[in-house]
Image: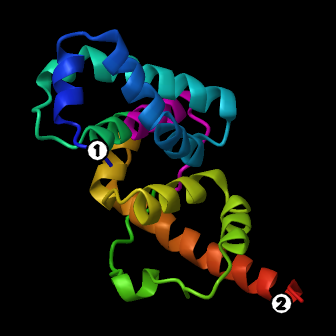
Amino acid sequence: MTDSKPLIKACQANSYSAQLQVFHTYKDLLYTAAIRILKRPSLAQDVVQEAFIKGFQRIGDLSEDSNLGAWLYRIATNLAIDALRKEQRFDWQDEEDTTFALSHEEDEIDEELPLQLMHQALEELKEQHRLVVVLYAIEGYSHSEIAEHLELKESTVRNQYRRAKIALKKAIEQKLKTCP
């Protein structure tokens, strides 16, 4: 990727051509983040548009040495989470069980597993499970960040993630049994 320092500077000076270049450079990245969370193309497109608007409004706060793509990606991800939360589509199971510990070894996935199969299994999860897996394992949010964004207890997020891993494992095993 090219040096974004002059691009950030040009956007801070309100250059339309620089903003257009930023849009064309990062629109697919932001859309990918939004669609993973929302699963609805029209809503994901709205989130991407809102992310660029918000980003260009706040570009003055960004230092020239910052990673522009990562900054916009985070804005889009946060907006997607907010959009999902506003819909209040989930029936979160709030449990106080925080006695288990997760290790990264548990989260590792066999590299030989076909990506398409993994994607299909992920799509079969309940919406709240899929969201927690996407945010934690794919987007890199911590349990506490997810809890804060979704206005939940961290223990609820941890429990949903644990349940999601179990359901995902079962879905993958089932898919592997049916694969030729």
Q: Is residue 27 magenta?
A: no
- Nearest the viewer among 46 and 18 is 18
Name the residue carrying label 2.
177
Crowding at label 1, few (<14), some or many (≥20) Cα neighbours within 10 Å?
A: few
Q: Which mark is residue 143?
A: none
Crowding at label 2, few (<14), some or many (≥20) Cα neighbours within 10 Å?
A: few
- Nearest the viewer among 99 and 179 is 179
> Judging from the image, what secondary structure is the residue with disc 2 in?
helix
- What residue is at 40 percent from the left and 66 percent from the top? 158
Q: Is residue 41 left or right of residue 141?
A: right
CA gap, disc 1 and disc 2: 45 Å
Q: Quadrant of residue 151?
A: top left
Across and down, in percent, residue 110 comes to 55, 88
Which residues, given as a range, are shown in magenta? 76-93
Across and down, in percent, residue 103 comes to 34, 84
- What residue is at 47 percent from the left and 29 percent from the top? 24
Locate the C terminus by quadrant.
bottom right
Q: Is residue 85 magenta?
A: yes
Across and down, in percent, residue 113 comes to 64, 84
- Nearest the viewer among 179 and 56 is 56
Name the residue carrying label 1.
2
